[in-house]
Image (spheres, rainbow, N blue to C red):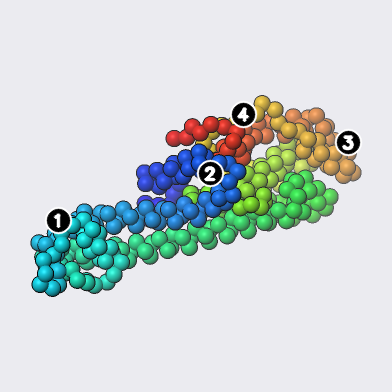
């Protein structure tokens, strides 16, 4: 299911695997363990191992009753009929094209052997395709994170990105860049829809954190939303570009919250320091000096932030391992 219908709705096996991993990471490893950086690769290997084990077990249970009847030894000695022999024959059938020292004699046993071989080769092909696709999507996500980091001068400060555009007379460049950010977010959203395991790939570098990418996009959209609301006729950016980034960011946050946040964080107040710094920057531009009211702008920014601040805080603190909340997932 995870390979042929790769959406964020996990099947029972994958969901159970994730729950067990949540328990191990929280109760045994602890939130500060560096082993958590291996979460993604470990889960990929675990998933593939569980799938292979279940496939082998299923074929074993089918061929076991056939030992000594439909499946016999190729020599004259009596055929062993134990469970281990059934596992051996099932594993040989799934991983090898042909037969060994055990040979199917009945039509049913032959069909089971052929079907097992076909399923086995298909399984290995699909697993390899799945792993390649996951790491390809991970590469695009990390590239997007690096692009955001470079946009802020490697500071992570949203204002560092916006102040260069506001000081420029070329507003088209900002509009184009906002649309590009929205497009990259849409690709990121669909990647996580197709491969939920992506969320568990963690890196020691802060710039690769999903919460940092979303904070940058949401703060950018909120600041531009606020200035458009306060100065509808003199906004430095096209409203369509802002709306694209706004909705793409909210959709990505909503999806991450729905599938990966295991507790909730509530914040009553919004940090308005960024809004005040931004309004000071805007008012330093001659054409905006007498028209932008800092308090009105801060209020508009706060209104936008209230739509995402709690969810983003939950994503930052309550995914998989967090010392700040109690585990209460489904």
- Counting residues from the start of the chain, the first of labels 3 and 2 encountered is 2
Q: Position of residue 269 (x, y in %)?
A: 70, 28
Residue 118 visible in the displayed image = no
The residues tagged by marks 3 and 1 sit, at their Cα atoms, a distance apart of 87 Å
Density class for disc 4 (Cα within 10 Å; few <14, some 14-19, many ≥20) is few
Q: Position of residue 256 (x, y in %)?
A: 54, 42
Please tell me which residue is depicted at 52% across the width and 60% down the height of the picture.
135
Which of discs 3 and 1 lies nearer the camera? The answer is 1
The residues tagged by marks 1 and 4 sit, at their Cα atoms, a distance apart of 58 Å
- Residue placed under numbered mark 4 in the picture: 266
- Residue placed under numbered mark 1 in the picture: 65
- Counting residues from the start of the chain, the first of labels 3 and 1 encountered is 1
- Left or right: 257 as drawn, with respect to 280: left
- Left or right: 180 as drawn, with respect to 28: right
Q: For residue 290, which numbered disc appears in the image?
A: 3
Say what secondary structure mark 3 lies in.
loop
The residues tagged by marks 1 and 2 sit, at their Cα atoms, a distance apart of 43 Å
The residues tagged by marks 2 and 4 sit, at their Cα atoms, a distance apart of 27 Å
The residues tagged by marks 3 and 2 sit, at their Cα atoms, a distance apart of 56 Å
Residue 110 visible in the displayed image = yes
Mark 3 and mark 1 residues within 8 Å of each other at the beta carbon: no
- Counting residues from the start of the chain, the first of labels 3 and 4 encountered is 4
Mark 1 and mark 2 residues within 8 Å of each other at the beta carbon: no
- Counting residues from the start of the chain, the first of labels 2 and 4 encountered is 2
Say what secondary structure mark 1 lies in.
helix
Q: For residue 29, which numbered disc appears in the image?
A: 2
């Amino acid at each position: 299911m995870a390979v042929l219908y790769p959406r964020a709705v996990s099947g029972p096996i994958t969901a159970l695997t994730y729950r067990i991993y949540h328990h191990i990471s929280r109760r045994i490893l602890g939130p500060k363990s560096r082993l958590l950086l291996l979460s993604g690769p470990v889960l990929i290997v675990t998933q593939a191992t569980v799938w292979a084990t279940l496939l082998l077990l299923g074929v074993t249970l089918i061929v076991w009753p056939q030992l000594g009847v439909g499946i016999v030894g190729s020599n004259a000695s009596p055929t062993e009929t134990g469970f281990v022999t059934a596992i051996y024959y099932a594993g040989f059938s799934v991983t090898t094209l042909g037969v060994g020292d055990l040979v199917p004699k009945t039509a049913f046993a032959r069909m089971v052997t052929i079907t097992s071989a076909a399923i086995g080769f298909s399984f290995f092909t699909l697993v390899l395709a799945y792993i390649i696709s996951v790491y390809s999507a991970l590469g695009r996500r990390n590239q997007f994170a690096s692009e955001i980091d470079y946009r802020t001068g490697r500071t992570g400060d949203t204002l560092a990105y916006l102040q260069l555009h506001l000081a420029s007379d070329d507003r088209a460049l900002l509009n184009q860049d906002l649309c590009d950010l929205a497009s990259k977010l849409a690709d990121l959203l669909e990647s996580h829809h197709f491969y939920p395991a992506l969320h568990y790939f963690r890196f020691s570098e802060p710039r690769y954190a999903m919460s940092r990418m979303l904070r940058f996009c949401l703060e950018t959209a909120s600041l531009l939303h606020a200035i458009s609301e306060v100065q509808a006729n003199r906004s430095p950016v096209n409203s369509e570009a802002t709306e694209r980034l706004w909705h793409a960011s909210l959709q990505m946050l909503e999806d991450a919250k729905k599938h990966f946040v295991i507790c909730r964080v509530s914040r009553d107040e919004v940090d308005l320091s960024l809004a005040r710094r931004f309004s000071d920057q805007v008012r330093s531009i001659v054409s905006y000096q007498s028209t932008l009211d800092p308090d009105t702008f801060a209020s508009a920014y706060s209104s936008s932030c209230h739509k995402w601040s709690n969810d983003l805080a939950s994503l930052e603190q309550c995914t998989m391992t967090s010392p700040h909340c109690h585990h209460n997932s489904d």
